[in-house]
Image: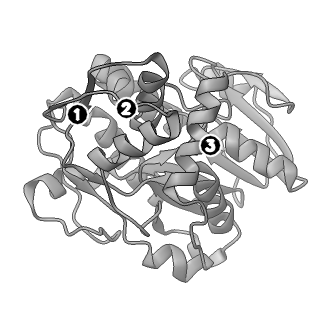
Amino acid sequence: MRILVLGGAGFIGAHLTRRLTADGHDVTIVDDFSRGRDDLGVPVIHADLTDPAAWAGLEKGWDQVYHLAAVVGVRNVVGAPARTMRVNTLALAYLLDWIEPGTKLFFASTSEAYAGGVTAGVVPVPTPETVPLHIEDVGAPRFAYAISKLWGEAAVLHSGVPAVIGRFHNVYGPRMGADHVIPELSLRAIKGENPFIVYGSEQRRAFCYIDDAVEAMVALMASEDAVGQIVHIGDDTAETQVADLVRLVHEVAGVSPELEHVPAPEGSVARRCPDLGRLRELTGYQPRVPLAEGVRRTFEWYRDN
């Protein structure tokens, strides 16, 4: 198949591109390279997807399009909420005007879409796709990302394009930058931080290794029954306290620093774990990489790169 990956130089996009290429597909990526790297060995189009001229010059005839291009990461979002809203909505709006009938679309959404409901105690954990979506404060910079993705989900569902919407839950792995908890902990352990600050040690997360997330994406795009569905993507086999995650990273790193426990950042959700019943029903998905192995692979990549 001919597959276009928008945001293909980013974390998930790069791993997805390698998987699709290994499967024998003809893959092209589009990226502005604000964060990613051009080292994937596939055709690359450098473009700003918020610029209509970029879409005018982009060829058509694709079997599948994965839309992963977005401003992501709490620090990036909080630091530039207006840019987050602009980039994440404009790029998708232009895509939906440009895409040809019959081309299947994957739209990357987020568990942040319902995170406010977890904090308010009105959403169960593990969380299914059917829960009400909840934004605590539309004026809070942190929620700009969630709002942009809520808009995106609605835009895709009403577009008439055959599409799958995947809500990612705490996906991690090599080459994902430094703004996510497992890479950040790994880098701090590598630097020998002591005392070691632990933010929100009682919070719980269900972490999903990138290879498992990519497997879920590919399987959903192969399922005709997934078209028109919102599907949670993650790993529901174990919830891990942040304190236990820190201990695991330190074991892998071979360090034993003193720990300094401090509150979690404002607005951080106390608990997050997806209900993957819909994903399993559609694809037979089962995560394969346990947290200890995924953390080891991630730590070693950051240590060596």
SS at mark 1? strand
The tag earlier along the polypeptide, 1 or 2, is: 1
Q: Name the residue under label 1.
A: 199
Query: Can you give x and y, in whole percent of width and height, for residue 146 in the image?
Result: 31, 42
Front of the two marks 1 and 2: 2
Residue type at mark 2: give it: Ser
Q: On the image, numbered disc 3 is attached to which residue?
A: 297
Considering only order in the chain, which callout, 2 or 3, is on the residue closer to the N terminus? 2
Q: Quadrant of residue 132?
A: bottom left
Residue at point 47%, 30% (across, down): 186
Report how far apart the C-alphas of labels 3 and 2 lie in the structure: 20 Å
- Nearer the observer: mark 3 or 2; the answer is 2
Residue most extreme to the left: 120
Residue type, mark 1 in image: Tyr
Answer left or right for 12 relative to 249. Answer: right
Q: Quick one: label 2, few (<14), some, or many (20+) residues within 10 Å?
A: some
- Asked if residue 84 lies left or right of residue 4, the reply is left
- Residue named by callout 2: 256
Count neighbours of disc 3 (C-alpha within 10 A) and say few if under 14, some if 14 to 19, many if 20 or more.
some
Q: Distance between the residues labelled 1 and 3?
A: 23 Å
Q: Residue 51: where, in percent of width, then height?
A: 57, 20
Earlier residue among tags 1 and 3: 1
Q: Mark 2 and mark 1 in contact (Cβ < 8 Å)? A: no
Q: Position of residue 127 (x, y in %)?
A: 29, 68
Occupied quadrant, residue 264:
top left
Drawn side of residue 201 relative to residue 177, left or right: left
Image quadrant where residue 143 sits: top left
The three-letter code of the residue at mark 3 reads Arg
**Disc 2 element:** loop
Q: Can you give x and y, in whole percent of width and height, for residue 255 in the image?
A: 43, 30
Question: Dot 3: what SS?
Answer: helix
